[in-house]
Each structure stands twice: as C-alpha cells, then as structure tokens.
Image (cartoon, grey):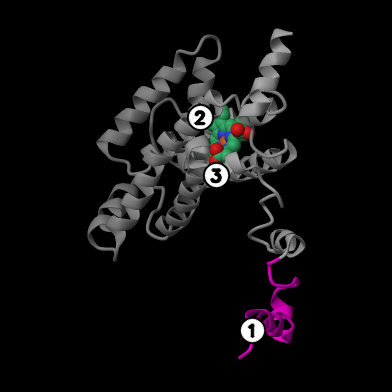
C-alpha cells in the first residue's frame, strides 16, 4: 500500500496541482510560508502572527466582523440599486414595491438595514477593544486616526441612507439633523446648504444624499479600510500585552 508521504508527493508533483499551487504541500515551515505569500486571499496576512492576536478574547473579532458587514452592505446595496431611483416621484413607491413585489425584496432591504445597524455597533465595540488593549498607542497612533475617520464614515453612511426611502420618518429625521448642522458656529448655514443643496429638504437633498451614500462615502471607506489593513501589517501586526507594558514603562521612566 502506498504511504501517506508518497501519495502527497504524487499529488504535489502533478502538473495540474503545480499549475494552481506554486509550492509544495504545506507540511514544512517553508511551504506553509509560501502558501500565505502566494495566495491572493491569504497574502493579506503576515507569514507569522503572534498567537495572542488570533484569540477571540483579545480582538473580540470586531474588526473582521465590521469588514464582513461592510462587504454585505456593498453587495446588498448594489443589488438594491436595481430597484430604486433617487427621485421624489419614485423613491417612496420603489421601496414599497421592493417590499411587496420584488422577489426576496424584503429580505434584501432588511439585510441592508440590519447590516448597517450592526456595523455601527461592531465598529464602536472594535474601537473600545482597541482602546482597552492599548492598541491606539505608539506606533499605531496613525492607524487610530484612520480608524476615527472610518467611524465617522460609518455614521455618515447610516445617516445618508436614512433619507433615501423618502417617507415621513426619513424626511423629518433629515430635517432635524440638518437643522442641528445649521447651528454650527460660523459655518452652520453653509454646511446645511452643502448637505441639502437648497433651503429645505427636497429633490436636491435626495440626489445629494444618494450620491454620497452610494459612491463617495463607500469609495472613501474602501480606500481607508485598505490603508487601515496595510498599517496593521506595517506596525508589526496587532498590539500585544507585552508591548503595552513596555510602552507604559517607557512613559513612567
Ligand atoms: C470600517 C471600520 C473598521 C474596520 C473594518 C476595521 C478593521 C480592523 C481589523 C480587521 C483589525 C485587526 C484586529 C481586529 O480585528 O481587532 C483592526 C485593528 C485596528 N483598528 Fe480597526 N477597523 C475599523 C474601524 C476602526 C476604528 C473606528 C478605530 C479607532 C478609532 C480603529 C482602530 C484600529 C487600530 C488602532 C487597530 C490596531 C489594533 C491593535 O494593534 O491592537 N479601527 N481594525
């Protein structure tokens, strides 16, 4: 009977296998490292990670869950665009039709809404975890700042999406919200005009909120999530309890 090693060797020396996987079977340190480096989906990870950073008790998994929810939002949002037009004549009816006449429309809309609600929660919890584990300290200050922008974008995406159904709830929420923006000292009225494109909530505001919601804010979010992940790699992976103790010692010296 052929041994396990000879079967493994036969598979990994096969031309089809070699055309897909450029390294041998991942049973040595070198091959395992190559799997990570040569695979499109894996190479976001460093070849070596500290064991504590894989523990759910350290990260709470909130960063990854936030990224997953954002992907769900992009996918369901793109699908929603097939059934929605940002015009005051159509918007409300389009949403009604989505709930009643489109196959799986209600599921689609609720997936988008729930993912948005959950993302606000998970990004907030992620921010708390980073703070409580000292992940915001040197050398990760810049990534913390990127994170703060991601948090603001998460809120702005929720806010701009709120107007789109063009129902009473949306209309008055946006009226109240933009009135609050309007009392910002010095630039309040200009800011309100910038958001609304007019003196009152109307068709101009709907088009502006739509453009911000489907294109500008998600585009910025994708770029900044890319920078965020790249910084994690460049800062030597996740913070660690030992590192935090060293930083604290440095502060008290
Ligand atoms: C769209 C929102 C966000 C996504 C998708 C995201 C994603 C991630 C992921 C996947 C990690 C790896 C560790 C982990 O899962 O906890 C991480 C780490 C980190 N995040 Fe975020 N994040 C977001 C928002 C934020 C916010 C709001 C902040 C802070 C204001 C922040 C600051 C950081 C920092 C400093 C690290 C490194 C932490 C460490 O080394 O311990 N992130 N982020």
Q: Which one is closest to the eye, mark 1 or mark 2? A: 1
Taking the image as four quarters, which one is ligand 1 found in?
top right
Label 2 C-beta lies within 8 Å of the nearest ligand 1 atom: yes
Label 1 C-beta lies within 8 Å of the nearest ligand 1 atom: no
> Dot 3: within a 10 Å radius of its alpha carbon, few (fewer than 14), some, or many (20 or more) residues?
some
The picture places residue 145, in percent across and down from the top left corner, at 63, 27
The picture places residue 247, in percent across and down from the top left corner, at 69, 19
For residue 216, say whether it is visible: no
The picture places residue 154, in percent across and down from the top left corner, at 49, 36
- As for residue 16 lying within the magenta part, the answer is yes
Secondary structure found at label 3: helix
Q: Are marks 3 and 2 in contact (CB under 8 Å)?
A: no
Q: Which residues are magenta?
A: 1-27
Nearest to the observer: residue 34 or residue 65? 34
Residue that numbered label 2 is attached to: 129
The picture places residue 59, in percent across and down from the top left corner, at 52, 37
Instruction: Identify the image quadrant of residue 239.
Output: top right
> Dot 1: within a 10 Å radius of its alpha carbon, few (fewer than 14), some, or many (20 or more) residues?
few
> Dot 2: within a 10 Å radius of its alpha carbon, few (fewer than 14), some, or many (20 or more) residues?
many
Residue appearing at x 61%, y 28% in the figure:
241
Residue that numbered label 1 is attached to: 3
Mark 3 or mark 2: whose residue is earlier in sequence: 2
Nearest to the observer: residue 253 or residue 222? 253
In this rendering, the count of numbered labels is 3
- Residue 218 tag number: 3
Q: For marks 3 and 2, give the CA distance.
A: 24 Å
Q: For marks 1 and 2, give the CA distance.
A: 48 Å
């Amino acid at each position: 009977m052929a041994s396990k090693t000879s079967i493994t060797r036969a598979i990994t020396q096969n031309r089809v296998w070699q055309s897909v996987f450029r390294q041998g079977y991942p049973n040595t340190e070198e091959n395992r490292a190559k799997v990570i480096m040569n695979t499109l989906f894996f190479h976001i990870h460093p070849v070596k990670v500290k064991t504590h950073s894989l523990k759910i008790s350290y990260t709470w998994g909130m960063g990854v869950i936030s990224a997953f929810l954002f992907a769900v939002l992009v996918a369901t949002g793109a699908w929603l665009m097939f059934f929605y037009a940002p015009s005051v004549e159509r918007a409300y009816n389009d949403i009604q039709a989505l709930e009643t006449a489109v196959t799986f429309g209600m599921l689609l809309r609720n997936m988008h809404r729930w993912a948005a609600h959950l993302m606000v929660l998970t990004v907030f919890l992620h921010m708390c975890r980073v703070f409580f584990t000292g992940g915001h300290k040197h050398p990760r200050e810049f990534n913390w700042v990127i994170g703060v922008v991601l948090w603001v974008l998460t809120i702005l995406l929720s806010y701009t999406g709120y107007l789109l159904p063009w129902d009473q709830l949306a209309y008055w929420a946006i009226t109240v919200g933009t009135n609050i923006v309007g009392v910002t000292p010095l630039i309040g009225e200009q800011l309100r005009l910038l958001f609304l494109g007019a003196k009152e909530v109307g068709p101009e505001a709907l088009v502006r909120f739509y453009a911000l919601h489907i294109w500008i804010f998600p585009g910025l979010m994708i770029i900044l999530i890319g920078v965020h992940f790249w910084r994690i790699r460049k800062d030597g992976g996740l913070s660690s309890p030992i590192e935090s103790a060293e930083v604290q010692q440095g502060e008290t010296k």
